[in-house]
Amino acid sequence: MRTEEFHYNLPEELIAQQPCRLRNHSRMMVVHREGGYIECRHFFELPDFLEMGDVLTINDSKVIPARLYGKKITGGIIEILLLARHGSTHRWEALLRPAKRVDIGTKIFFGNQARAEAKERISEKKWILDFHMESDFKSFLDQHGRAPLPPYIKRKKTNADYVDDLKRYQTIYAKSPGSVAAPTAGLHFSTDTIETLKKKSIAIAPVTLHVGYGTFLPVETDCVEDHAVEKEYFELTRDTAGIINRAKRVIAIGTTAVRTLETVSDGNGNIAPGEGYTDLFIYPGHRFKRVDGLLTNFHLPKSSLFLLVCAFAGKELMLKAYRKAIEERFRFYSYGDCMLIL
């Protein structure tokens, strides 16, 4: 398949720069695969589309404040995006900007009590950093880190919005720290929504998949099948497996939940508990084993996430839905509106 087939044009003004004021008041497009019809609703109406016996599978991974700004001894500012722990707690793989101003041994300071040292260049912008500080690493991140917003959400380095982002670029049920990007479909859930679902006997089954920076990267190969996604760590407990295996329907909250379920499902759709790393790349032609519905945000063109929703609902139906979303002025990407595919 040609990657170019999964392109669409999005007006820049539809890229959401701020979250909806109330989490559960985002707009929600409902796409019915059988019949191919589309409704424009709101997220707080989600329970109306669910039935007793349905199970929502959520990703409870917690975003860490992985964006840092430090200074070289010369005073030059270096932006750091932590990607993954590299062995010890204080050694990290990270993206640096501007990377051309960094050499092996360069020290980056965060006030007087913490610094990072560039130890190894992995690629043009990717480095291994060693951090040195008086406090523990979590306390260091809490003090100096900012929400690792994707590059299409614009913030000034001194913008107070970063304080709000630490709260809003996080699901209300996040508990397992490790993601450097939010599982954004879950951002729409409020406490009220969760309570409404429980009253309707809709079960919620948590999984954990720590989202990596690769989730934002476009598919750059001409042929879809030549693309590879980066490995991400996941966990799925025995209790969660039992809840899902008893489900009438499984509604995955986000593409990360889909990838976790499809990784651990056998050929008959039975879920087994487990943990490890997945590099499952889902694109049209994939046979889904345990996902009956999907709540997801609107994704970048030619991204692995857009390919996943095309695999789930069909390319033509998804392109039709995205065209309608643009016509109806839905808000796109991480802080944008959502889509329920049934």
Image (spheres, grey):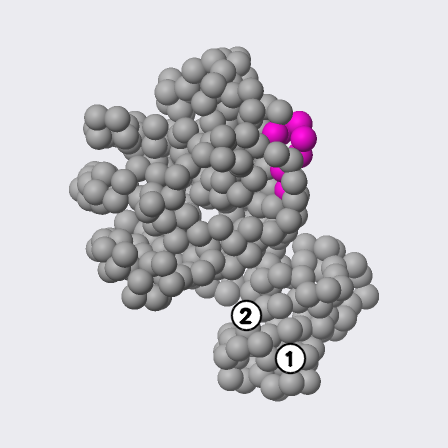
Say left or right for 216 vs 80.
left
Q: Secondary structure at mark 1?
A: strand
The quadrant the N terminus occupies is: bottom left
Name the outermost residue toward the front: 267
Say left or right for 59 vs 10.
right
Name the outermost residue toward the right: 134
Q: Position of residue 324 (x, y in %)?
A: 20, 39
Q: For mark 1, does the 10 Å Cα neighbourhood hold few (<14), some (14 to 19), or many (20 or more) residues?
A: some
Q: Quadrant of residue 121?
A: bottom right
Q: Mark 1 sits on what residue? A: 120
Q: Please give the range of residues in magenta.
A: 235-241
Q: Mark 2 sits on what residue? A: 95
Q: Position of residue 216 (x, y in %)?
A: 43, 57
The quadrant the C terminus occupies is: top left
184 or 161: nearer the viewer: 184
In magenta stretch: residue 203 = no
Q: Is residue 328 visible?
A: yes
